Image (cartoon, rainbow, N blue to C red):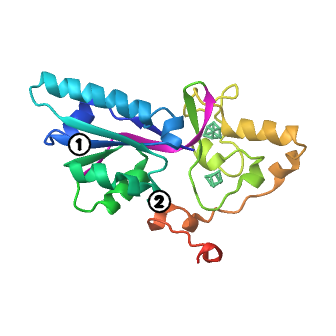
Amino acid sequence: MIVASPKSITELKSIIEGHRKVLFVGCGTCVTVCLAGGEREVSISSYAIRMARRLDRNPVEILQITIERQCDNEFLKELAAPASEAEAIVSFGCGAGVQAIAERFPGKPVYAALNTQFLGVLEQQAVWTEKCMGCGDCMLAHFGGICPVTRCAKRLLNGPCGGSTETRCEVDPDRPCAWQLIYERLKSIGQLGRLEEVVPPKDWSTAWYGGARKIVRREHQV
Ligand code: SF4
Ligand code: SF4
């Protein structure tokens, strides 16, 4: 899922400083699961901002709504009525959600309440870790399902750098060495022989360096 974290109340307050009536929009999918932008977080932030503005003697009215997915036009229809009442919209969705709302309401300021971080998994309660950078040419089959593009600090595709200490990465000892994990995984699935294959240079043309990417699946179009 997409993992995001909330901007501070101080930053959010400053972003909407000039507005008197604002719509806060939560998203019911990834950012709800990662406790950053669901109904609960929208409600807590609304309360905090209202209190802070009241103390500043500059009150603000905040409307609230949480829709199922901000990145899907189908659900954005629900915003039409509350958005028409507000001077500005604050999206608690990921960066895609913020931009989808901005395209839907071209005459309205739309702001991000979150910092979108990465594609990751819930490791343990309230701890998420990055697992994929969306490179567009998945190579996990070579590495026993552990991604060195994302998890090796040097993005090495043909073995470790040799700097790890007791299974920890030399760049950040808080992280396991991705190549240690790859070795252990390949060993446990009986594929250690893969370490002898030379992985060719990665085709980065499928990644993000050429600008925003687009997928069209004609077989699903009507
Ligand atoms: S190889 Fe690319 S697509 Fe596959 S997990 Fe790594 S970053 Fe994601
Ligand atoms: S120690 Fe391991 S994870 Fe860290 S940069 Fe070297 S090979 Fe990559």
Q: Is mark 1 on a helix, strand or loop?
A: strand
Specify whether 32 is left or right of 108.
right
Residue 80 visible to an observer of this rendering: yes
Which residue is painted at 55% across and 26% down in the image? 126
The three-letter code of the residue at mark 1 reads Val
Which circle's residue, 1 or 2, is located before the other in the chain? 1
Q: Name the amino acid, label 2.
A: Glu
* Quarter of the figure with residue 24: top left
Question: How far across and how far down the image is residue 133, in percent?
Answer: 56, 51
Instruction: Give the left or right position of residue 161, taking residue 119 as reference.
Output: right
Q: Is residue 92 visible?
A: no
- Residue at 59% in and 24% down: 125
**Which numbered disc covers residue 74?**
2
Q: In the rendered structure, which segment of residues is drawn in magenta?
A: 110-124
Q: Quadrant of residue 173?
A: top right
Image coordinates for residue 139, horizontal then vertical, percent: 70, 56
Residue 117: x and y in percent read 46, 42
How crowded pointer 1 is (Cα within 10 Å; few <14, some 14-19, many 20+) is rated as many
* Residue at (29, 60) in percent of width and height: 105
98 or 25: nearer the viewer: 25
Q: Quadrant of the C terminus?
A: bottom right
Q: Name the residue under label 1.
A: 22
